[in-house]
C-alpha cells in the first residue's frame, strides 16, 4: 500500500504564506500596542491569516468543519477591520 504524499508544492506555498501573514500580524499587533491607528490593519491581517489557515486546513488536514469556522471568523474580523478603517466603528 502506497502512502499518499500530503505535503506538495502547493501546500508548501500555503504554509509559507501563512507564516508571512502571521509574522506581519504579529508586527502590526505590536505596533497596535504603541499606536492604536494600526488596529484596523491588524484586524485585516488576522482575518487574512484565518483565510490562509482555512485553506491549509482544507488542503492538508482535510477537516471540513474547522475550515468553515475559520472562514466565518475571517469574514467577520475582516469586516470589522474594514468598518473601523473607514471610521464606522
Image (cartoon, rainbow, N blue to C red):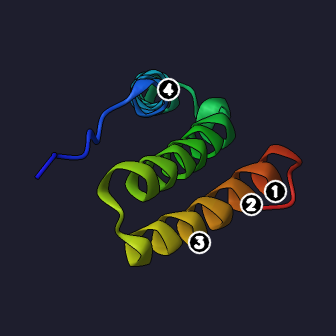
Can you say whether 88 is above or below 60 in the image? below
Residue 43 image position (x, y, % from top left): 59, 46
Residue 58 lies, in percent from the top left, at: 44, 58
Whole-percent x, y for residue 2 in the image: 15, 46
Query: Tag on residue 17?
Result: 4
Q: Secondary structure at mark 2?
A: helix
The structure residue drawn at horizontal position 67% and vertical position 63%, both measured from the top left corner, is: 75
Q: Nearer the viewer, mark 4 or mark 2?
A: 4
Secondary element type, mark 1: helix
Q: Residues within 10 Å of mark 4 (few under 14, many from 20)?
A: some
According to the picture, the residue beneath numbered tag 3 turns out to be 72
Of residues 66 and 60, the one nearer the viewer is 60
Q: Disc 3 vs disc 2: Cβ atoms closer than 8 Å?
A: no
Q: Is residue 75 left or right of residue 64?
A: right
3D distance between C-alphas at marks 1 and 4: 25 Å
Cα–Cα gap, marks 1 and 2? 6 Å
Q: Which mark is residue 37?
A: none
**Secondary structure of the residue carrying numbered label 4:** helix
Q: Nearer the viewer, residue 56 or 21?
A: 56
- Measure how far apart labels 3 and 2 are at the Cα level: 11 Å
Label 4 – label 2 distance at C-alpha? 21 Å
* Residue 79, numbered circle: 2
The residue at which mark 1 appears reads as 83
Picture coordinates of residue 41, whole percent (x, y): 66, 35
Secondary structure under the numbered disc 3 in the rendered image: helix
* Mark 4 in CB contact with mark 2 (< 8 angstroms): no
Q: Earlier in the sequence, mark 4 or mark 2?
A: 4
Circles 1, 3 touching at the beta carbon (< 8 Å): no
Q: Answer yes or no: do the residues labelled 1 and 4 have beta carbons within 8 Å?
A: no
Amino acid at each position: 500500500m502506497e502512502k499518499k504524499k500530503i505535503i506538495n508544492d502547493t501546500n508548501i506555498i500555503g504554509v509559507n504564506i501563512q507564516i508571512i501573514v502571521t509574522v506581519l500580524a504579529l508586527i502590526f499587533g505590536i505596533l497596535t500596542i504603541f499606536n492604536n491607528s494600526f488596529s484596523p490593519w491588524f484586524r485585516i491581517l488576522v482575518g487574512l491569516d484565518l483565510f490562509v489557515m482555512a485553506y491549509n486546513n482544507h488542503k492538508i488536514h482535510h477537516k471540513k468543519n474547522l475550515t468553515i469556522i475559520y472562514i466565518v471568523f475571517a469574514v467577520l474580523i475582516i469586516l470589522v477591520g474594514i468598518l473601523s478603517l473607514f471610521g464606522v466603528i
